[in-house]
Amino acid sequence: MRARGGEGEGKGRSVWARGRVSAAFAVLTAGLLAFPRAVPNSPGRLGSLLETFLPWLGLVVVILFGIALLRRSATALVALLLPAATWTYLFGGLLLPGGGPGVPDLVVVQHNVSDENPDPAGTARTLADAGPDLIALQELVPSALPVYERTLAPAYPHHAVHGTVGLWSKYPLTRDRLLHIKPAGITEAWNRGLRAVVHTPRGEVAAYVAHLPSVRVGVGGLASSWRDESATLLGRAVAAEPVKAVILLGDLNGTVDDRGLAPLTSRMNVAEGGFAFSFPGAFPLARIDQVMARTATVTQIRTLPGTGSDHLPVIAGITRR
Protein backbone atom coordinates (compact mmCIF):
# COMPACT_ATOMS: atom_id res chain seq x y z
CA MET A 1 0.00 0.00 0.00
CA ARG A 2 1.41 3.43 -0.93
CA ALA A 3 2.22 5.65 2.04
CA ARG A 4 0.39 8.92 2.41
CA GLY A 5 1.85 12.30 3.35
CA GLY A 6 4.99 14.23 2.53
CA GLU A 7 7.42 11.74 4.12
CA GLY A 8 6.41 8.80 1.97
CA GLU A 9 6.23 10.91 -1.14
CA GLY A 10 9.70 12.37 -0.43
CA LYS A 11 11.23 8.91 -0.12
CA GLY A 12 9.67 7.78 -3.33
CA ARG A 13 10.81 10.72 -5.43
CA SER A 14 13.95 10.72 -7.54
CA VAL A 15 17.14 12.27 -6.16
CA TRP A 16 16.82 14.72 -9.05
CA ALA A 17 13.24 15.64 -8.20
CA ARG A 18 13.88 16.38 -4.52
CA GLY A 19 15.40 19.60 -3.15
CA ARG A 20 14.17 22.06 -5.77
CA VAL A 21 13.53 24.72 -3.12
CA SER A 22 17.06 24.30 -1.76
CA ALA A 23 18.40 24.51 -5.30
CA ALA A 24 16.48 27.75 -5.84
CA PHE A 25 17.99 29.22 -2.66
CA ALA A 26 21.43 28.13 -3.84
CA VAL A 27 20.98 29.99 -7.14
CA LEU A 28 19.67 33.06 -5.26
CA THR A 29 22.70 32.99 -2.95
CA ALA A 30 25.04 32.81 -5.92
CA GLY A 31 23.27 35.78 -7.46
CA LEU A 32 23.61 37.85 -4.28
CA LEU A 33 27.30 36.98 -4.05
CA ALA A 34 28.04 37.78 -7.67
CA PHE A 35 25.80 40.83 -8.06
CA PRO A 36 25.27 42.46 -4.64
CA ARG A 37 24.86 45.84 -6.29
CA ALA A 38 21.70 44.58 -7.92
CA VAL A 39 20.16 45.04 -4.47
CA PRO A 40 19.08 48.70 -4.31
CA ASN A 41 20.34 50.99 -1.58
CA SER A 42 16.96 52.61 -1.16
CA PRO A 43 15.14 52.26 1.10
CA GLY A 44 17.31 51.57 4.13
CA ARG A 45 20.60 51.10 2.25
CA LEU A 46 19.88 47.40 2.08
CA GLY A 47 22.55 46.95 -0.58
CA SER A 48 25.26 48.29 1.72
CA LEU A 49 23.93 46.13 4.55
CA LEU A 50 24.24 43.03 2.36
CA GLU A 51 27.74 44.02 1.25
CA THR A 52 28.86 44.54 4.84
CA PHE A 53 28.21 40.89 5.67
CA LEU A 54 28.77 39.44 2.19
CA PRO A 55 31.42 36.85 3.22
CA TRP A 56 28.95 35.38 5.71
CA LEU A 57 26.81 34.14 2.83
CA GLY A 58 29.28 31.28 2.86
CA LEU A 59 27.41 30.02 5.93
CA VAL A 60 24.23 29.89 3.86
CA VAL A 61 26.05 27.61 1.42
CA VAL A 62 27.10 25.33 4.28
CA ILE A 63 23.55 25.17 5.64
CA LEU A 64 22.10 24.42 2.21
CA PHE A 65 24.72 21.71 1.75
CA GLY A 66 23.58 20.04 4.96
CA ILE A 67 19.94 20.24 3.88
CA ALA A 68 20.82 18.77 0.48
CA LEU A 69 22.55 15.82 2.15
CA LEU A 70 19.60 15.21 4.47
CA ARG A 71 17.18 15.35 1.54
CA ARG A 72 19.53 13.28 -0.63
CA SER A 73 18.95 15.78 -3.38
CA ALA A 74 21.27 15.62 -6.37
CA THR A 75 19.60 18.73 -7.79
CA ALA A 76 20.41 20.81 -4.72
CA LEU A 77 23.98 19.50 -4.55
CA VAL A 78 24.64 20.38 -8.17
CA ALA A 79 23.05 23.82 -7.72
CA LEU A 80 25.30 24.46 -4.70
CA LEU A 81 28.34 24.31 -6.95
CA LEU A 82 27.35 27.75 -8.22
CA PRO A 83 27.43 29.70 -4.91
CA ALA A 84 30.39 27.64 -3.66
CA ALA A 85 32.43 28.54 -6.73
CA THR A 86 31.35 32.19 -6.55
CA TRP A 87 32.30 32.49 -2.87
CA THR A 88 35.66 30.85 -3.53
CA TYR A 89 36.35 33.23 -6.41
CA LEU A 90 35.46 36.30 -4.34
CA PHE A 91 36.91 35.40 -0.95
CA GLY A 92 38.99 32.25 -1.29
CA GLY A 93 42.12 34.28 -1.99
CA LEU A 94 41.79 35.97 1.41
CA LEU A 95 42.46 32.59 3.02
CA LEU A 96 45.88 32.42 1.35
CA PRO A 97 49.06 34.27 2.38
CA GLY A 98 49.15 37.59 0.57
CA GLY A 99 51.91 39.69 -0.87
CA GLY A 100 54.30 36.96 -2.01
CA PRO A 101 57.84 36.47 -0.74
CA GLY A 102 60.01 39.19 0.71
CA VAL A 103 59.83 41.73 3.49
CA PRO A 104 57.30 44.57 3.14
CA ASP A 105 58.59 48.11 2.88
CA LEU A 106 56.39 49.25 5.74
CA VAL A 107 54.43 47.52 8.47
CA VAL A 108 51.46 49.48 9.77
CA VAL A 109 48.95 49.12 12.58
CA GLN A 110 45.46 50.58 12.60
CA HIS A 111 43.43 50.72 15.83
CA ASN A 112 40.36 52.49 17.18
CA VAL A 113 41.45 52.56 20.81
CA SER A 114 37.97 53.54 22.14
CA ASP A 115 37.25 56.67 24.11
CA GLU A 116 36.27 54.42 27.05
CA ASN A 117 39.45 52.34 27.06
CA PRO A 118 40.36 51.57 30.72
CA ASP A 119 44.00 50.73 29.93
CA PRO A 120 45.56 53.09 27.36
CA ALA A 121 49.10 52.25 28.51
CA GLY A 122 48.52 48.53 28.03
CA THR A 123 46.93 49.19 24.65
CA ALA A 124 49.93 51.25 23.54
CA ARG A 125 52.33 48.51 24.65
CA THR A 126 50.37 45.84 22.75
CA LEU A 127 50.61 47.89 19.56
CA ALA A 128 54.29 48.76 20.00
CA ASP A 129 55.20 45.14 20.76
CA ALA A 130 54.03 44.21 17.24
CA GLY A 131 56.92 46.34 15.92
CA PRO A 132 55.18 48.29 13.13
CA ASP A 133 56.69 51.33 11.44
CA LEU A 134 53.46 53.33 11.71
CA ILE A 135 50.63 53.27 14.24
CA ALA A 136 47.35 55.04 13.49
CA LEU A 137 44.88 55.62 16.34
CA GLN A 138 41.33 56.92 16.59
CA GLU A 139 39.15 58.03 19.51
CA LEU A 140 42.03 59.71 21.29
CA VAL A 141 40.52 61.60 24.22
CA PRO A 142 42.42 64.39 26.05
CA SER A 143 42.76 62.38 29.27
CA ALA A 144 44.38 59.39 27.52
CA LEU A 145 46.49 61.20 24.90
CA PRO A 146 49.45 61.90 27.25
CA VAL A 147 49.54 58.20 28.16
CA TYR A 148 49.81 57.17 24.51
CA GLU A 149 52.43 59.83 23.85
CA ARG A 150 54.53 58.80 26.85
CA THR A 151 54.26 55.03 26.23
CA LEU A 152 54.93 55.14 22.48
CA ALA A 153 57.66 57.80 22.54
CA PRO A 154 60.69 55.49 23.02
CA ALA A 155 60.02 53.49 19.84
CA TYR A 156 58.04 56.12 17.93
CA PRO A 157 59.69 59.52 18.36
CA HIS A 158 57.61 61.18 15.64
CA HIS A 159 53.89 61.71 15.94
CA ALA A 160 51.07 63.99 14.85
CA VAL A 161 47.64 64.41 16.43
CA HIS A 162 44.68 66.37 15.10
CA GLY A 163 41.37 66.20 16.90
CA THR A 164 40.76 62.62 17.99
CA VAL A 165 43.08 60.88 15.49
CA GLY A 166 46.83 60.41 15.64
CA LEU A 167 49.79 58.91 13.80
CA TRP A 168 52.98 57.58 15.43
CA SER A 169 56.02 56.85 13.28
CA LYS A 170 59.56 55.52 13.46
CA TYR A 171 60.37 57.89 10.60
CA PRO A 172 60.18 61.69 10.49
CA LEU A 173 56.80 63.30 9.80
CA THR A 174 56.31 66.64 8.09
CA ARG A 175 53.48 68.75 6.65
CA ASP A 176 50.86 67.27 8.93
CA ARG A 177 47.47 68.93 8.87
CA LEU A 178 43.84 68.47 9.73
CA LEU A 179 41.66 66.77 7.11
CA HIS A 180 38.26 68.33 6.60
CA ILE A 181 35.97 65.32 6.24
CA LYS A 182 33.11 66.43 8.49
CA PRO A 183 29.64 65.91 6.97
CA ALA A 184 27.55 69.06 6.59
CA GLY A 185 24.89 67.76 8.98
CA ILE A 186 27.26 67.57 11.96
CA THR A 187 27.27 70.95 13.69
CA GLU A 188 29.37 70.23 16.81
CA ALA A 189 33.17 70.15 16.95
CA TRP A 190 34.28 67.13 14.92
CA ASN A 191 37.89 66.65 13.83
CA ARG A 192 38.55 63.07 12.84
CA GLY A 193 41.07 63.12 10.02
CA LEU A 194 44.72 64.01 9.44
CA ARG A 195 47.30 63.90 6.69
CA ALA A 196 51.07 63.78 7.13
CA VAL A 197 54.10 62.99 4.99
CA VAL A 198 56.25 60.09 6.21
CA HIS A 199 59.90 60.19 5.16
CA THR A 200 60.66 56.47 4.75
CA PRO A 201 63.93 54.92 3.52
CA ARG A 202 62.23 54.43 0.15
CA GLY A 203 60.94 57.96 -0.17
CA GLU A 204 57.95 60.06 0.84
CA VAL A 205 54.60 58.51 1.63
CA ALA A 206 51.46 60.54 2.33
CA ALA A 207 49.71 58.94 5.31
CA TYR A 208 46.03 59.58 5.91
CA VAL A 209 44.35 58.70 9.22
CA ALA A 210 40.57 58.88 9.39
CA HIS A 211 37.61 57.93 11.51
CA LEU A 212 34.42 58.09 9.47
CA PRO A 213 31.00 58.56 11.12
CA SER A 214 29.36 55.55 12.70
CA VAL A 215 26.56 53.64 11.03
CA ARG A 216 23.53 52.16 12.74
CA VAL A 217 21.54 49.07 11.88
CA GLY A 218 17.83 49.27 12.75
CA VAL A 219 14.43 48.19 11.57
CA GLY A 220 14.70 50.69 8.73
CA GLY A 221 17.98 49.22 7.49
CA LEU A 222 21.43 50.80 7.54
CA ALA A 223 21.80 54.47 8.50
CA SER A 224 25.03 55.47 6.77
CA SER A 225 24.45 58.79 4.99
CA TRP A 226 27.00 60.71 7.08
CA ARG A 227 29.55 57.93 6.69
CA ASP A 228 29.04 57.95 2.92
CA GLU A 229 29.36 61.74 2.74
CA SER A 230 32.58 61.67 4.78
CA ALA A 231 33.98 58.90 2.55
CA THR A 232 33.31 61.09 -0.49
CA LEU A 233 35.22 64.01 1.07
CA LEU A 234 38.10 61.72 2.00
CA GLY A 235 38.16 60.25 -1.51
CA ARG A 236 38.46 63.73 -2.99
CA ALA A 237 41.38 64.53 -0.67
CA VAL A 238 43.19 61.35 -1.72
CA ALA A 239 42.54 62.09 -5.39
CA ALA A 240 44.09 65.56 -4.98
CA GLU A 241 47.14 64.28 -3.04
CA PRO A 242 50.32 65.35 -4.85
CA VAL A 243 52.56 62.71 -3.23
CA LYS A 244 52.44 59.61 -5.42
CA ALA A 245 52.43 56.96 -2.68
CA VAL A 246 49.49 57.13 -0.27
CA ILE A 247 48.51 55.00 2.72
CA LEU A 248 45.09 55.27 4.33
CA LEU A 249 44.60 53.91 7.83
CA GLY A 250 41.30 54.28 9.56
CA ASP A 251 38.14 53.14 11.21
CA LEU A 252 36.00 53.61 8.13
CA ASN A 253 32.88 52.05 9.66
CA GLY A 254 32.43 49.94 6.56
CA THR A 255 33.90 46.94 4.76
CA VAL A 256 35.75 47.13 1.46
CA ASP A 257 32.74 45.52 -0.26
CA ASP A 258 30.35 48.25 0.93
CA ARG A 259 29.45 50.56 -1.96
CA GLY A 260 29.42 53.46 0.51
CA LEU A 261 33.23 53.31 0.53
CA ALA A 262 33.49 53.28 -3.27
CA PRO A 263 35.01 56.81 -3.33
CA LEU A 264 38.01 55.20 -1.58
CA THR A 265 38.09 51.62 -2.87
CA SER A 266 37.83 52.85 -6.45
CA ARG A 267 41.05 54.82 -5.99
CA MET A 268 43.08 52.60 -3.66
CA ASN A 269 44.27 49.02 -3.27
CA VAL A 270 42.93 46.90 -0.43
CA ALA A 271 44.42 43.90 1.37
CA GLU A 272 45.20 40.91 -0.83
CA GLY A 273 45.02 38.31 1.94
CA GLY A 274 43.30 37.87 5.28
CA PHE A 275 39.82 38.57 6.58
CA ALA A 276 40.96 40.27 9.82
CA PHE A 277 37.46 40.86 11.19
CA SER A 278 37.97 43.66 13.72
CA PHE A 279 34.54 44.58 15.09
CA PRO A 280 32.99 44.04 17.55
CA GLY A 281 36.06 43.03 19.52
CA ALA A 282 34.32 40.36 21.59
CA PHE A 283 32.93 38.54 18.55
CA PRO A 284 34.21 40.10 15.32
CA LEU A 285 31.79 39.98 12.40
CA ALA A 286 33.36 42.42 9.94
CA ARG A 287 36.54 44.35 9.24
CA ILE A 288 35.69 48.02 9.45
CA ASP A 289 39.26 49.01 10.36
CA GLN A 290 40.99 49.37 7.03
CA VAL A 291 44.43 49.71 5.49
CA MET A 292 44.47 50.92 1.87
CA ALA A 293 47.22 52.17 -0.41
CA ARG A 294 47.84 53.94 -3.68
CA THR A 295 50.81 52.90 -5.88
CA ALA A 296 51.53 50.22 -3.28
CA THR A 297 50.27 46.75 -2.35
CA VAL A 298 48.66 45.92 0.97
CA THR A 299 49.89 42.45 1.84
CA GLN A 300 48.51 40.01 4.39
CA ILE A 301 46.35 41.75 6.98
CA ARG A 302 45.56 40.21 10.35
CA THR A 303 44.32 41.16 13.78
CA LEU A 304 46.40 41.63 16.91
CA PRO A 305 45.35 40.56 20.42
CA GLY A 306 42.47 42.45 21.96
CA THR A 307 43.04 45.58 24.01
CA GLY A 308 40.71 47.60 26.19
CA SER A 309 38.86 48.69 23.04
CA ASP A 310 35.71 47.34 21.41
CA HIS A 311 37.78 47.02 18.20
CA LEU A 312 40.66 44.66 17.49
CA PRO A 313 43.86 46.21 16.10
CA VAL A 314 44.82 45.22 12.56
CA ILE A 315 48.36 44.97 11.21
CA ALA A 316 49.37 44.89 7.54
CA GLY A 317 52.43 45.08 5.33
CA ILE A 318 52.84 47.68 2.58
CA THR A 319 55.02 47.00 -0.47
CA ARG A 320 55.86 49.93 -2.76
CA ARG A 321 55.47 49.48 -6.48
Image (cartoon, rainbow, N blue to C red):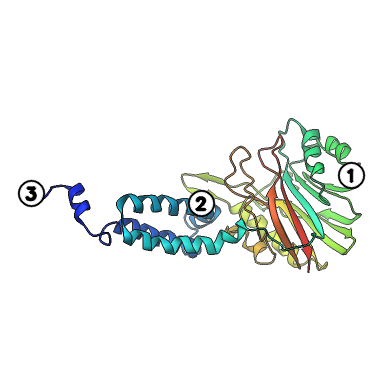
Residue 143 against residue 215 in the figure, above or below: above
The numbered mark, 2 or 1, whose residue comes first in the sequence reads: 2
Gap in Å between the C-alphas at discs 2 and 1? 39 Å
Regarding residue 278, the answer to whether it shows in the image is yes
Left or right: 16 in relation to 156: left
Residue 285 against residue 247 in the figure, above or below: above
Give the residue at x 60% y 56%. Answer: 95
Q: Quadrant of residue 93?
A: bottom right
**Mark drawn on residue 3:** none
Cβ atoms under marks 2 and 1 closer than 8 Å: no
- In the picture of the structure, the residue carrying the numbered disc 3 is 1
Which class describes the residues within 10 Å of circle 3: few (<14), some (14-19), or many (20+)? few
Gap in Å between the C-alphas at discs 3 and 1? 83 Å
Name the spot of residue 78 as percent of width and height, x first. 37, 63
| Outermost residue to the top | 118
- Residue kind at label 1, given as amino acid type: Ala
In depth, the one of 205 and 44 nearer the eye is: 205
Name the spot of residue 80 as percent of width and height, x first. 40, 60
- In the picture of the structure, the residue carrying the numbered disc 1 is 155
- Residue kind at label 2, given as amino acid type: Trp
Residue 158 against residue 85 in the figure, above or below: above
| Outermost residue to the left | 1
Name the spot of residue 210 as percent of width and height, x first. 73, 52
- In the picture of the structure, the residue carrying the numbered disc 2 is 56
